[in-house]
Image (spheres, helix red, strand yellow):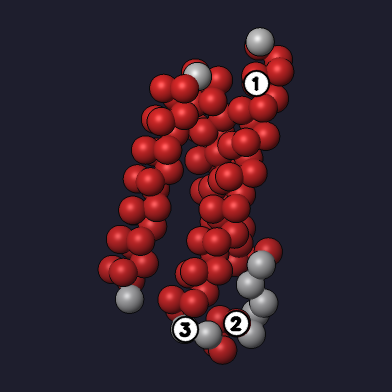
Amino acid sequence: MRVLVFLSFLFASLFMVGLTIFMWTESPLYGVGGLIGIVGFYIAYAISGDMVIAPRDFWRFSSWEVFKKKMSYAFTAFGVVAIIAAGVLTVIFE
């Protein structure tokens, strides 16, 4: 299970880097917003065990289900933080 979780986390990270590179081609301000979003993703993943998962979920659900909850929380944080950061940077610098 650890290998599957590691590979999923690795592919998610590569996806975000690719998305940030695409955002950078549109505008450097969007790219910086994407980088800030990646930082938000890692922070959200780190705290998601305490924020969105009830203590009973760790023994009630499989580790894969808990991982999916943590990833959904982290991806939501990535999207929201990247959009807000890109919007704020665009308003400030343009």
Q: Is residue 54 visible?
A: yes
Which mark identifies residue 57?
A: 2
Residue 84, image x, y percentages: 67, 34
Q: Is residue 46 visible?
A: no
Residue farthest toward the top in the current orientation of the protein = 94
Residue 70, image x, y percentages: 54, 64
Residue where numbered disc 1 is placed: 89
Residue type pointed to by label 3: Ser
Q: Residue at x 61, y 49 (%)?
A: 77
Residue where numbered disc 3 is placed: 62
In terms of secondary structure, where does tag 2 sit? helix
In terms of secondary structure, where does tag 3 sit? loop
So how many labels did they put on this image? 3
Residue 88, image x, y percentages: 70, 25
Number of other residues with Cα within 10 Å of mark 3, as a class: few under 14, some 14 to 19, many 20 or more: few
- Quarter of image, res 73: bottom right
Q: Is residue 93 above or below residue 40?
A: above
Q: Is residue 36 above or below residue 49?
A: above
Residue type pointed to by label 2: Asp
Q: Is residue 38 above or below residue 52?
A: above
